[in-house]
Amino acid sequence: MNWEEKVDLFFGESIVSPMASILFWPVPGLQMPLVVAWLLCGALFFTIKMKFVNVRFFKHAIDLIRGKHDSKESKGEVTHFQALTTALSATVGLGNIAGVAIAIGTGGPGATFWMILVGFLGMSSKFTECVLGQKYRKIRKDGRIMGGAMHYLSDGLKELKLKHLGGFLAGMFCVLCIGGSFGGGNAFQVVQSLDLIKNVFPSLANWPWAYGLALSILVGLVILGGIKKIAKVASIIVPFMCGIYLLACTYILIISCSKIPFAISLIFSQAFSPDAAFGGFLGVLIIGVKRAVFSNEAGIGSAAIAHSAAKVSHPVEEGIVALLEPFIDTILVCTMTALVIIVTGSYLDPQNQEFIAKNQGGALTSAAMGSVISWFPYLLSFAVFLFAFSTMISWSYYGERCWVWLFGDKSSVYYKIIFLIFTFLGSIITATNILDFSDLMILGMAFPNILGLILLSGKIRDDLNEYEKSLN
């Protein structure tokens, strides 16, 4: 056993397994992981409580992004568009390319339906948390803005005479968010992008650590610049990489248009009566929910950190802008990825079963696209590198804000050093261990966040009603 395998074994046995026994505890009677049930119930509650804000304000969200309602008096560090692209750069990434492939490979086409449903309901969760992110943000003397779930959990619940509960939930959120930034927002991006790229450039298989080292250097150069630097880079990279990826998906779906009706039929039929080989109905639902939340992050509170820095005239504005994220991320990008994988039949191809067994979703998506556009894996390798890079720089900001909340501004440099160490580790730890750790951290953030959102939901509904009246 070499040193890379020893590190991977220690990581899986000593860190991942003990945590999984707690966070993925099956609810008696449902046999559904507690965190999955919690996320589903939370998203449904917010959708009903806010009177389907995800539908009623969809057009208004687009108008806000276009700058139709911008005001010179609005205070903040970045625009609506930059806040959206910063948050999207953390969500539109390997979760869409690799996560969807993993969902279909392990759960079958039916997992796509549950991903779309969770994306739709998640729009309301995202709205709720981003309104609070704005409502309880703090503008410091140096002009920097501090906001996010840790602030609305501590300050918001303090207003409800729940100071100690708020402090505990905020601390718990920060610890999990820091872990999530090391896992899903960092090492997962490295390992999935590496798995895809080394299938196109096999020589990398012998030097995986070199890829991790190169990414560590590049990410380090950007994250030292703060939110304005991150937002500027993200606002350029995200539209560009999404455009490349969606154009390729569109082309494949156009030339395979005769297979799309069957693919859609398969998604619906297997969502409710899936093949037993994929784990039955409940197994497909759980896989769909986990991969959707991992992709769009609705309900876990991370996006509220980026959106708290946006220039707004009313907190509800940014919540409405934020509800576009799960739509773009899950309902649009993830669905197109899923259709490409299904119409090409790559998830059933015996040659790709090793990718599924090892949770190498990026490689499976590359194989699906390469079966139609032979040269596209080369272009996808470049796009995936940008996806991974942009997600990592945004998650570094999320984790750093939580670290500073816990340990103070002067400790920020220590967080960044640890973050870059995990970037390197992502190139030598297996995809399965990284995926499990990432699920644990990112899904775990939903426990403190959704509890706080439910307790504060009355304040958000009042703000929404007030904002709605101002538009009339």
Image (tube, rainbow, N blue to C red):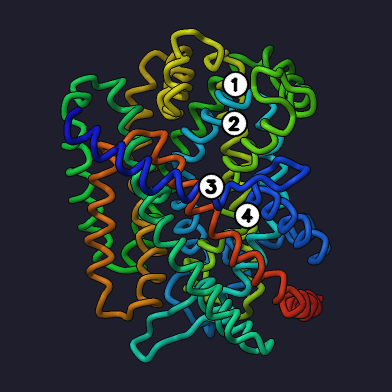
| Residue hosting label 2 | 336
Q: Amino acid at mark 4?
A: Leu
- Position above or below: 188 against 257: below
Local crowd size for mark 4, using a 10 Å CA cut-off: few (<14), some (14–19), many (≥20): many
| Residue hosting label 1 | 253
Of residues 206 and 64, the one nearer the viewer is 206
Q: If the image is split into quadrants, where does the C terminus sit? A: bottom right
Local crowd size for mark 3, using a 10 Å CA cut-off: few (<14), some (14–19), many (≥20): few
Of residues 425 and 50, the one nearer the viewer is 425
Q: Are marks 2 and 1 in contact (CB under 8 Å)?
A: yes
**In-image side of 79 versus 266 (left or right):** left
Q: Earlier in the sequence, mark 4 or mark 2?
A: 4
Q: Residue 360: horizontal and vertical position, in percent?
A: 42, 27
Q: Earlier in the sequence, mark 3 or mark 2?
A: 3
| Residue hosting label 3 | 21
Q: Earlier in the sequence, mark 4 or mark 3?
A: 3
Q: Amino acid at mark 3?
A: Ser
| Residue hosting label 4 | 324
Local crowd size for mark 2, using a 10 Å CA cut-off: few (<14), some (14–19), many (≥20): many
Q: Give the SS element for disc 3.
A: helix
Q: Label 3, label 1: how many angstroms apart (C-alpha)?
A: 41 Å
* Residue drawn at the location 61% of the way across and 14% of the way down: 256
Q: Amino acid at mark 1?
A: Leu
**Residue 239 is at least partly visible in this image:** no
* Residue drawn at the location 43% of the way across and 21% of the way down: 355
Q: Label 3, label 2: how many angstroms apart (C-alpha)?
A: 34 Å
Q: Give the SS element for disc 4.
A: helix
Q: Earlier in the sequence, mark 3 or mark 1?
A: 3
